[in-house]
Amino acid sequence: MSAPQTREPSLVDLARWGDRAALIDDDGPLSYADLAAAVHRRAQVLAAEPRRARALAPAPTRAFVTEYLAHLQSAQPVLLTHDDALTARFLDDADAPAPHPDLRLLLGTSGSTGSPRLVRLSRTNLESNAAAIAAALGLDETDRVLLTLPLDYCYGLSVLHSHLLVGAAVVLHPGSVLDAGLWSHARAAGVTSFPAVPHTLDLLDRVGWPDLPLRRVTQAGGRLAPERVLALARTARRDGWDLVVMSGQTEATARIAVLPPELAAVHPDAVGYAVPGGRVHLAEVPAEDGGAPGVGELVVEGPHVMMGYATTAADLARGPEVAALATGDLATIDPDGLVRVVGRRARRAKVFGVRLDLDHLEHRLREELPDLAWAHAVALPDDAGVGVLHGPGAEPVEVRRVVAELADLPAHRVEARGADQPPRRPNGKPDQPAIAALLSAAPAAPIGPGDSDDPHAPDDVLTAVRRAVAEVLELPLETVTPESAFAGLGGDSLSFVEASVRLERLLGALPLDWPRLTWRELVHRTAAPTTPTTPRGPADAPGRWARLETAVVLRALAIVLVVGSHTDLFTLKGGAHVLLAVAGAGFARFLLPVPAAERPRRAARALARILVPAVLWIGVVTVVTGSYSWAAVLLVESLVDSSWDEQWHYWFLEVLLQATVLSVGLLAIPAVARAERRDPARVALTVLAVAALARWTEYLLPWRDHIHSLPWTAWLFAAGWAAVVVRTRRQRVVLTVLVLLAAADFVVLPRLSVITLGVLLLVWCPTLRWPRALVPATAALAAASLWTYLTHWQIYPWFETRWPLGGLLASLTVGLLITAAERRWGPTRRTTPDLRTTRPVPERPTREALR
């Protein structure tokens, strides 16, 4: 009797793993059997179509993974990219020959030095490297990996491949380590493995490591300093997981070397041994290019080495052409095969995450500027950038701009300087170190007001975005860098309204997580021509309807309800209570992502923007009219009086102050802070449940005005907080139940209906379909809600008995005028950048960081 046949693992043989979970997302697990069936159905459709390369926009969803695997199964080559220019260049040529039979995947490479290049990868490349990674890491079907890396990035794609190959589960999530729902999602899924880039590890140091049953943390995407590896190895040993340092390139289908975890603390300067099936050796490098005894260029061989590059559509028809990959890394190799990368070849550079062949860059520069007499490109010291020393025929500003475009670099990473002749070595060759020294000392060539530091987005768009944000936040333009973000620049709920509307005018529909994106990422995201989407489905196309943030709409409607009810134009109360829930949502959105140590200072600054104008206004009114007590002026009336009268006009501000201070204080407790990092939704729902219980204790206390006191209304603030951090449908259902329980018997039915509807809109509808013609007015009313609330008590009584509508219109107009005046002539809130708060807090690492 013959032995049973064992099948070689394959990315297209998914059904072998049966009912095991293959993908886990907010909708729960998807089994291998179900994934295999969906892939097979789609692959049958694709197989019936002519064979040609197609583009897919990667996304952390089961739909994308299914489509991608179906292309692999049907042997239809696929380009993973969000770049339409790349798609047009390589895939839209009707006269291009059919792609090579072995071709399966096309990925952009950070090695671009002129014309865009794609890396051509075969199924053998993909599966051999996936198997090598799985073997090196010891992966098996019990692993569950949290995948937050982009899937058009070779590291993120290799995580997907290697785990699917062994029947492990891949947990998909679109957020970053700063995302309030990420770790609760990971805990619920039982994550055992986490892949990280250096930027991610830096963020984890800031916010704290998650409490997960981790087996391993893998690191790639950039070199870590040896002392950093040692520190992480100590953390790993303390917490019981393995740190695995890896090195790779897209051209090697992701991974070249893996450092066993037991060696991280022994050889923290090493990148590891060649992956199983791969081979590495050193090629001799001239001394002027960085070579030295024992140091050469790292060369990789094996089945994972790419088929070759593609620089034109015709190249997709070419077969395998690369047997040995010269990486450009200067390295040493121990007798036992341990690799250490010690630098880059002198004519190669890696700047801002982009690998550059400087010889090719010079060639392309002379093609673009044919009148240029000569040009020599060098890597500036400490990877500061690229420098070009050039002769007559072009101005430095022109050379700088062209190099930035060719090399796909920000302009501030390029230096250019003219000279009659270059410094030369005795052998007549250009003296590279001398050229680098000249350029390092040269002042930056100005690029002009219309130029941008962003190589990917239109100059005028990014510049307009940065200028708009600088005006809204009242910051110097140079502080609003392409790599900063709204949350990191100190944006809050007041500035959010104006910023979101102004940005939508520039960019169209904004993604819901835009406050955490860098401006570079935001312009990238909104520049995509695909239909904008929200978590609930496609956004509305341009026309009579637009999408507005629910919080913005509620602020505008609520202030109209507040003033209209007070003027007796109509009786529809509850607007101020809805505003309290919106304030809770703002707390979660703009304060929770801030590191714990920064929250008290950031909260104090946000409250000051509200309370300082309030105290000044109420104080002036009190001096002139004697209307209020000094307890009301100082917003402590609820602490000294319990009956409703005009002294309680500003109860909303008092409750907002008290709720914010208590929430920040609660999160300052170490145990609560740790719990909130692990599971923000559970903490928020617990706070809401406690606040709902506290509401009922009001009946036991000697307060005569319940609905305007903190114990009675704190649940609204907590509900808004929870609405932001819950992620799953189940969590939203629990939140809805808690809201309905807290609202029971809260107030009479008309007011209760307004309050409940407003809170549930925050929970279930992050955006609302809104008439486009009303967007400017809605945004203006929302932005002016504070001054309208402050001043309407003194405005509407003049009209109340004679013309209620006039009271409403006059109150709104005064609020709008004061808000506009404050914006134009008020004191600058931040004239000097605060380096502790102007650093970006991105939704995920930038593509440059990942490269």
Image: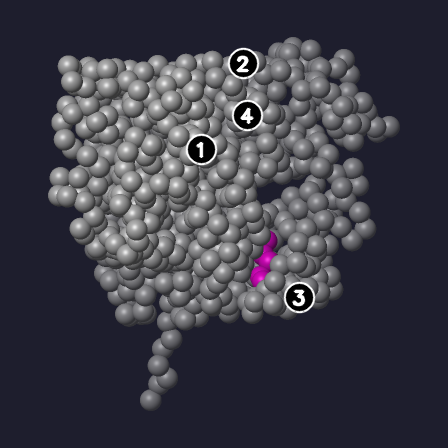
For the residue marked with disc 2, what is the amino acid? Pro
Residue 244 magenta: yes
Q: Residues within 10 Å of mark 1 (few under 14, many from 20)?
A: some
Numbered tag placed on residue 245 in the rendering: none
Q: Are marks 1 and 2 in contact (CB under 8 Å)?
A: no
**In the picture provided, is 396 more to the left or to the right than 51?**
right
Q: Residue at x 20, y 48 (%)?
A: 746
Numbered tag placed on residue 263 in the rendering: 3
**Most common secondary structure along the magenta stretch:** strand
Q: Are marks 3 and 2 in contact (CB under 8 Å)?
A: no
For the residue marked with disc 1, what is the amino acid? Leu
Cα distance in 3D space between marks 3 and 2: 51 Å
**In the picture provided, is 754 more to the left or to the right than 155?**
left
Q: Are marks 4 and 2 in contact (CB under 8 Å)?
A: no
Q: Residue at x 28, y 70 (%)?
A: 18
> In front: 237, or 324?
237
Label whose residue precedes the other's in the sequence (1 or 2): 2
Q: Secondary structure at mark 2?
A: loop
Q: Which residue is mark 4?
A: 830
Marks 3 and 4: which is nearer the front? 4
Which range is magenta? Answer: 243-248
Cα distance in 3D space between marks 3 and 4: 48 Å
For the residue marked with disc 4, what is the amino acid? Arg
Q: Which residue is mark 2?
A: 449
User: Residue 849 location, x and y as percent?
Assistant: 54, 41
**In the picture provided, is 465 more to the left or to the right than 21?**
right
For the residue marked with disc 3, what is the amino acid? Leu
